[in-house]
Amino acid sequence: MENKEFDVITIGSATMDAFIESDKASVVNVSTIDHNTELMAFPYGSKLEITDFTLSSGGGGINTAVNFANLGLKTSTIIKLGEDNVKETILKLLKERNVDTSNAIISNKIGSGFSVILVSFQGDRTVLAHRGANSKIAKQDINFDAIKKSKWLYVAPLAGDSNKVLDEIAQFAEENGTNLAINAGTTAIKKGANYFSKIIKTAEILVLNKEEAQMLTKISVRPDTKEIFYSKEDIHPDVKTMLQKLREDSEAIVVITDGKHGAYAYDGKKMYVCPPFDGPVRSTLGAGDAFASTFTAAIERTNWDVELSLKMASVNSSSVVEQFGAQDGLITFDTIEEKLKNSPDYKVKVINEIG
C-alpha cells in the first residue's frame, strides 16, 4: 500500500454534552403485545435535585478520533462546528489529544451541536440532542484528498442532511484504496436497504447495534417462549440470520453489538459470540463508539484477527462505561493487552459451522 498521511480519518458528529445524573429518575417498563419499552421518568411539574453534573465534549466523530489517537494511530477528523464557544472548546480538546484538526469544518451560519444526557441510576442514558452544524456536512465541505491519503476512513453515525454525502465518500474511499469502517446510524438506515447495501459493498467493517440491524434487515429477534434467549455459549438464530443477510452482498466483517449482552460478528466463514468484559457500569454513553473504533484499530494491529479484535474492543468499551464521560475511560493497547493477560478465562466463542 502506498504511504498514507493518516492512519485513520473519522467523520461524524461533534457536540458539547451536559451529563445530568439524578437519583430521582425512575425506569418504567411499558409492555405491548409485541415489544417492551423502558422509559426514564421524572415526576411531572416537579423540581428535582441533581446528583451529579458534568460538561464535556462528545459525538461519534470526536469520540472515535480521540480513541484512535489514544490507541497510537495518526488521526484526523472531519467534523462541522459553528463559530462559537463550543468550537473553541472542542478544537482545543482535540489538539490536546493529538488529533489533527485541519479537516474540521467551521460554519458562521449555524451553531455547534449540543446534547443534554440524562443518566439513570442503572447507568443507562437518554440523550436530548440538538444536531446543529452536525447535520449540515456537505460534499463541498469535505477534503477528499485527505481521505485519499488515509489508510482508513471511519464513518460514525451522521445526522440529518449529512447522510447525503455517505454514498459518495464510501465510493471515493473504495476507488482510492482507503479501507472503510462504518458504524451505521438510524438516519442512514431509514433510507432503506437498497441505498445502504451499495455502501456496505464498499466497506471492510460494518458495525450496527442490534436495533439498527433489525431495522436494516427487517428481522426481529424473537424472545424464547420461556425466557429471553441470551447466552455466552451460543447465538440467537435470528441474530445468525441477520449477520448472514447483512453479508450477502458484501465482504465486510459484520459486527452487531447488543449492549450488556456483548457483541456478535461474522466474517463469512465463522461467527463469533463476544460476551461483555466484566466491570462496573456508571454510564453507557460512548461505549458503542469505543467498541467499534477499537475493533477497527485492533483489526489493523492483529492482522485481521477477528476473535482477538473483539476481545480488545470489549475491554476498552468496559473501561469507558466505568467513567461518566464518553472519553474519560479510554485506555491504550498496552493496557488492553495487560487486562486480557490478567483475564485468561475471558473467551470469545467461535462457531465454525453455520446452521
Image (cartoon, grey):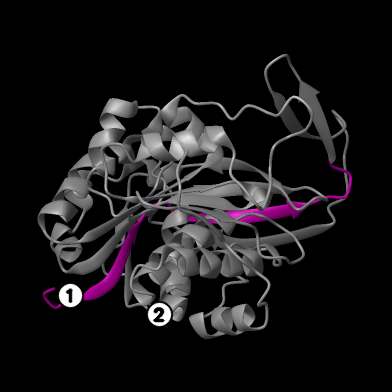
Q: Secondary structure at mark 2?
A: loop
Magenta residue check for 8: yes
Residue placed most toward the observer, 323 or 263: 263
Q: What's the residue at 46%, 80% (across, down)?
A: 96
Left of 105 or right of it: where is 25? Answer: right
Badge 2 is on which residue?
A: 98
Q: Which mark is residue 242?
A: none
Q: Secondary structure at mark 1?
A: loop
Q: Which quarter of the figure is the N terminus placed in?
A: bottom left
Left of 273 or right of it: where is 202? Answer: left
Q: Amino acid at mark 2?
A: Asn
Q: Is residue 89 above or below residue 21?
A: below
Bounds of the magenta segment: 1-25
- Rendering coords of residue 90 (x, y %): 46, 65
Q: What's the residue at 85%, 28% (across, down)?
A: 44
Residue 138 makes an appearance in the image: yes
Report if the CB atoms under discs 2 and 1 are less than 8 Å apart: no
Q: Is residue 205 above or below residue 38?
A: below
Magenta residue check for 338: no
Q: What's the residue at 37%, 76% (across, down)?
A: 301
Q: Residues within 10 Å of mark 2 (few under 14, many from 20)?
A: some
- Rendering coords of residue 2 (x, y %): 11, 75
Foreground mark, 2 or 1, reads: 1
Badge 1 is on which residue?
A: 4
Left of 133 or right of it: where is 59? Answer: right
- Rendering coords of residue 63 (x, y %): 49, 62
Q: Is residue 215 above or below residue 79?
A: above
Q: Residues within 10 Å of mark 1 (few under 14, many from 20)?
A: some
The mark nearer the N terminus, 2 or 1, is 1
